[in-house]
Amino acid sequence: MMDSTNKSLVILLSNVVVLLLAATTVQSCFPSDRAALLEFRAKLNEPYIGVFNTWKGQDCCKGWYGVSCDPNTGRVAGITLRGESEDPIFQKAKRSGLMTGSISPAICKLTRLSGIIIADWKGISGGIPSCIAKLPFLRHIDLVGNKISGVIPANIGMLLRLKVLNLADNQISGVIPPSITRLTSLAHLDLRNNNISGVIPRDIGRLKMLSRVLLSGNKISGQIPESLTRIYRLADLEISMNRLTGSIPVSFGKMSVLATLNLDGNLISGEIPGTLMTSSISNLNLSGNLITGRIPNTFGPRSYFTVLDLANNRLQGPIPASITAASFIGHLDVSHNHLCGKMPAGSPFDHLDATSFAYNTCLCGKPLGYCKK
Ligand SMILES: *[C@@H]1O[C@H](CO)[C@@H](O)[C@H](O)[C@H]1NC(C)=O
Ligand SMILES: *[C@@H]1O[C@H](CO)[C@@H](O)[C@H](O)[C@H]1NC(C)=O
């Protein structure tokens, strides 16, 4: 019989053996992945803080800044280089410097990559290597805040696992590739502030996982695809500052979780669908368009707006009486229209400023002046 000290020693030793076994199954870097990383690095220049100084030695899975590997295979799974990170090493970069250069097609040799995050360096230029569309495990592409130009690879639709595509704040031109409608895992599409032209693919509504579609600040033309209104997870749709024409699909007002609808700064015409006033939308900006007709008299207790901006359009008629039935209106702007008539009394008019109603044809009553008899 073992005494208890011996017994615990045996348990301890067997634990050590298990730990050693576990440690030896952690693979070190795949040599071809290491070579691809060094090729990738050779096209980038980061002179200020030396993020790439850690990229040395044989094992790229150990201590190489921003490189993550699958521990079982030693294959590189992620590259994460963020210029705006909270990591102290980057605070200095924010103050004193940027990364320049371009994204080398050598990145496509990392065939097990699931994430590419090269964000907020301000200085990285050149195009997106079109071969990334052949990385079958990619889930996450985030190149926000650089100077990337060229087009979105036409065959991007091959990335069937892609969940996040964020190319915002770059200089990308060309169109939204029609193949994007094959990305059925896509949840987050952010192409804001680029130079993208052409139309939004008509069948974008096939992307049922989408919750955020952010396209503001481009040169997108054509109509708003009706199919967008059939994406029931869609919570934020921002297409401000583009060249959209046509009218606002009525069915936006019937979407269950749509919270933000920003269509300001386009060439949208037609009338405001009455359903928008009692929908799930709480942030509605339609300002700076060519919208005609009246403000719908369809407000009710379900109407809850943190922002309701209808300024700079061609709206006529009065402010509808039902607006006082809204449960909340934080920021209202109907200035620069052709509205006329007596203001309804009561909330929300008790907290709104006269500037919200300025530059109309003949609105009167609190907070504006008295109505003439
Ligand atoms: C934007 O795209 C247009 C073509 O649509 C091109 O002529 C123009 O040079 C681009 N501008 C920038 C800043 O890239
Ligand atoms: C609505 O859009 C206009 C034009 O893009 C912008 O100036 C305004 O600030 C936006 N309104 C709000 C409340 O954000």
Image (cartoon, rainbow, N blue to C red):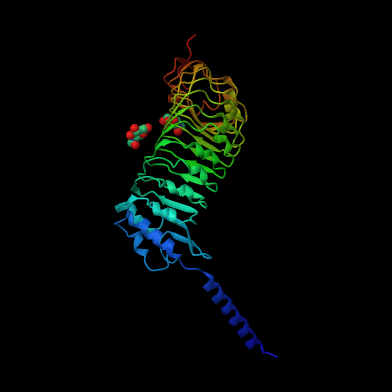
- At 35% from the left and 60% from the top, the residue drawn is 52
Residue 232 figure quarter? top right
The residue under the point 43% across, 21% down is 336
Judge by depth and name the residue closer to the eye, 161 or 305: 161
**294 left or right, relative to 192:** right
- The vertical placement of 126 against 11, above or below, is above
Q: Which corner quadrant of the image does residue 220 belong to?
A: top left
Query: Relative to 208, is 313 on the left or the right?
Result: left
Q: Is residue 91 above or below residue 366?
A: below
Identify which residue, 368 or 82, lies in the foreground: 82
- Looking at the image, is 65 positioned above or below residue 283? below
| Residue 344 vs residue 110, the one in the foreground | 110
Can you name the residue that lies furthest to the right here? 1
If the picture is divided into quarters, which one holds ligand 2? top left
Nearer-the-camera pick, 44 or 146:
44
Q: In which quadrant will I find the N terminus? A: bottom right
43 above or below 55? above
What percent of the width, then of the height, locates residue 337? Answer: 45, 19
Tell whether 368 sits left or right of 325: left
